[in-house]
Image: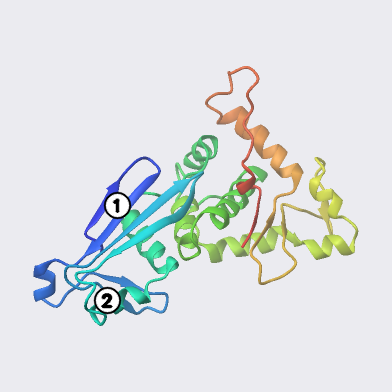
Amino acid sequence: MPKQNDVVSDTYFSVTWYTSLTEHDKKKPQRLRTDKGNFIDIPLNCTLEASVVVEFNKISLKNYTVRYSSLDDPNENLWADKLTHKIVLDNAVRSLWADNLAIPVLTEPEELFLAHTLKDSDRVSTKGNHNKALIFSTWCFALNNVPRGFQSEWLEMKLGMDNSYIQQIINRNSVKYSDLQADKKTADIWKPKKFEYKDKPVYFVRHSDKKIQGGYMPQWLVDEYEEFLNKEFNPTKDIIGWKYTLNPESKGATS
């Protein structure tokens, strides 16, 4: 684990790794895990610093800096050649999340509804249109904003269900775009009227290609969900002329 997590601002974080003399003497250097489960050891007197930002709830690596003990020893500096953007980001997110930092959050009405649904349960119920909308919109949010290796963990934190479980829910309550296309019903996705496919309500439209995750919430469900959140969980609903709407990142995703 890294030596230090620093909160620069509400949306800007710095993670620093370095190996202390004690760790070096004990042959237990600071290390970063790679995608394949291997490790990159950080030598004594070397430092890796990563800058992580959470802008519009999307986690990203702004940059990272490597400081060597000596520029004259190419063999000692080979460790940094193994670093990639993804390796640094994944290790930084793991470190920050361990301290409950840089965890993306939904909009306030969605978070309030989520807290309400989990008041007496560890998992969001799939019963009712509003709960289904919560699950689908949260899944889209994760695909758009959370690094791939952390999406399932984040979804479990939020909904009490991992990505595999959510996939089962989506498969039971959705239809592929190509199926609607074959029946000339794709225009219904964007209409405010509730519609069905093979006598079942369409709660979500998946991408036709199985290799592509994500899809779209139909407009009728978006409208119904927004109306519900405005009525029950919008803390600023008394402000004249202001109406809560779902962010685009929560209505559809492609990953």
* Residue that appears at 55% across and 66% down: 164
- Which numbered tag is attached to residue 200? none
Front-most of residues 93 and 131: 93
* Quadrant housing the C terminus: bottom right
* Residue that appears at 13% across and 70% down: 23
Disc 2 residue type?
Asn
Residue 192 image point, x, y percent: 80, 40
Front-most of residues 95 and 163: 95
Q: Quadrant of residue 175?
A: bottom right
Circle 1 residue: 99
Residue 77 image point, x, y percent: 27, 76
Disc 1 residue type?
Asp
Marked residue nearer the N-terminal end (1 or 2):
2
* Residue that appears at 22% across and 76% down: 72
Q: How is the image coloured?
A: rainbow
Packing grade of label 1 (10 A; few <14, some 14-19, many >=20) is few
* Quadrant housing the N terminus: bottom left
State the CA–CA distance, disc 1 to disc 2. Answer: 30 Å
Front-most of residues 38 and 157: 38
- Specify whether 234 is left or right of 20: right
Looking at the image, is mark 1 or mark 2 nearer the viewer?
2
Q: Quadrant of residue 73?
A: bottom left
Circle 2 residue: 77
**What is the total number of numbered labels drawn onto the structure image?**
2
**In the displayed image of the protein, which residue is found farthest to the right?**
184
Q: Secondary structure at mark 1?
A: loop
- Specify whether 64 is left or right of 73: right
- Specify whether 42 is left or right of 122: left
Q: Secondary structure at mark 2?
A: helix
